């Protein structure tokens, strides 16, 4: 009993009521881990220069000269007389130099000039053939105009005579392209009658192949004379 009383005095009052501590809420946050940063490769260290090793040549030993043993050679006495070498004063004479005669200069041979080239031959008619054909053509035209001329009555009644010089232009085929009076008779009726004779004539029929391209006009005379 004493023991219980002593404990009651010494030990304080204990509250044996069990009180539960307040609940604590724990919050958990999920954090996405960061991607690791790429590792940067360190630049390669520059190669350390390698110093070339010095080349050491082996020291060559200088060979010592070998002394040859000279053997005494017995010389036999010669019976031939020893001839002395000629001195510088009594040297052999220089060889004779034969001078060759200069050659005469050869003159170039005369070359005759080539003959003159012949002029090219004309494939067409010659000048004489063209001139002969032109004269024949003029005579034929003169006769054709004489057959087709008409004497004007007024000039005939008055007894007027005269010659008319005409210049007739023709083309490549012989057609008349123009007529002009280059020498008047002094009478208009005679001049007009001569030009009218050209219009009534067919001069193309007298054109020759030789004259193509070599004649473009001719000059003819138309005469008017009264018969007695």
Image (cartoon, helix red, strand yellow):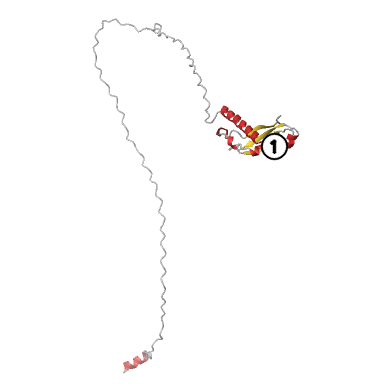
| Number of marks drawn | 1
Q: Label 1 belongs to which residue?
A: 193
Q: Residue at x 59, y 37 (%)?
A: 204
Q: SS for tag 1?
A: helix
Q: Is residue 94 above or below residue 199?
A: above
Q: Position of residue 79 (x, y in %)?
A: 26, 5
Quadrant of residue 88 within the rendered picture: top left
Q: Position of residue 182 (x, y in %)?
A: 70, 33
Q: Nearer the viewer, residue 23 or 149?
A: 149
Q: Nearer the viewer, residue 188 or 147?
A: 147
Q: Residue at x 69, y 37 (%)?
A: 193
Quadrant of residue 60 within the rendered picture: top left
Residue reaching furthest to the right = 158
Quadrant assignment for the C terminus: top right
Q: Is residue 129 above or below residue 81?
A: below
Residue reaching furthest to the bottom = 1
Q: Nearer the viewer, residue 158 or 115?
A: 158
Q: Are there few (<14), some (14-19), or many (20+) residues within 10 Å of tag 1?
A: some
Q: Is residue 215 above or below residue 38?
A: above
Q: Position of residue 179 (x, y in %)?
A: 67, 37
Q: Is residue 200 above or below residue 62?
A: below
Q: Nearer the viewer, residue 43 or 227?
A: 227
Q: Position of residue 176 (x, y in %)?
A: 63, 38
Quadrant assignment for the N terminus: bottom left
Q: Determine whether, in the image, residue 89 is placed left or right of residue 190.
A: left
């Amino acid at each position: 009993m004493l023991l219980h009383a002593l404990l009651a005095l010494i030990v304080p009052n204990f509250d044996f009521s069990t009180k539960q501590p307040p609940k604590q809420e724990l919050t958990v946050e999920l954090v996405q881990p960061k991607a690791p940063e790429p590792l940067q490769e360190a630049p390669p260290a520059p190669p350390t220069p390698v110093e070339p090793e010095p080349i050491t040549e082996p020291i060559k030993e200088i060979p010592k000269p070998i002394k040859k043993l000279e053997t005494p050679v017995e010389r036999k006495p010669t019976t031939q007389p020893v001839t002395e070498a000629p001195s510088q004063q009594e040297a052999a004479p220089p060889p004779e130099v034969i001078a060759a005669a200069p050659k005469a200069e050869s003159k170039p041979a005369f070359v005759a000039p080539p003959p003159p080239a012949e002029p090219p031959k004309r494939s067409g008619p010659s000048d004489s053939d063209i001139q002969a054909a032109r004269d024949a053509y003029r005579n034929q035209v003169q006769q054709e105009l004489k057959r087709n001329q008409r004497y004007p009555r007024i000039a005939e009644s008055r007894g007027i005579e005269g010659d008319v010089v005409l210049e007739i232009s023709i083309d490549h085929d012989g057609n008349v392209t123009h007529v002009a009076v280059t020498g008047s008779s002094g009478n208009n009726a005679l001049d007009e009658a001569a030009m009218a004779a050209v219009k009534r004539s067919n001069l193309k029929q007298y054109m020759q192949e030789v004259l193509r391209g070599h004649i473009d006009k001719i000059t003819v005379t138309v005469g008017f004379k009264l018969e007695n």
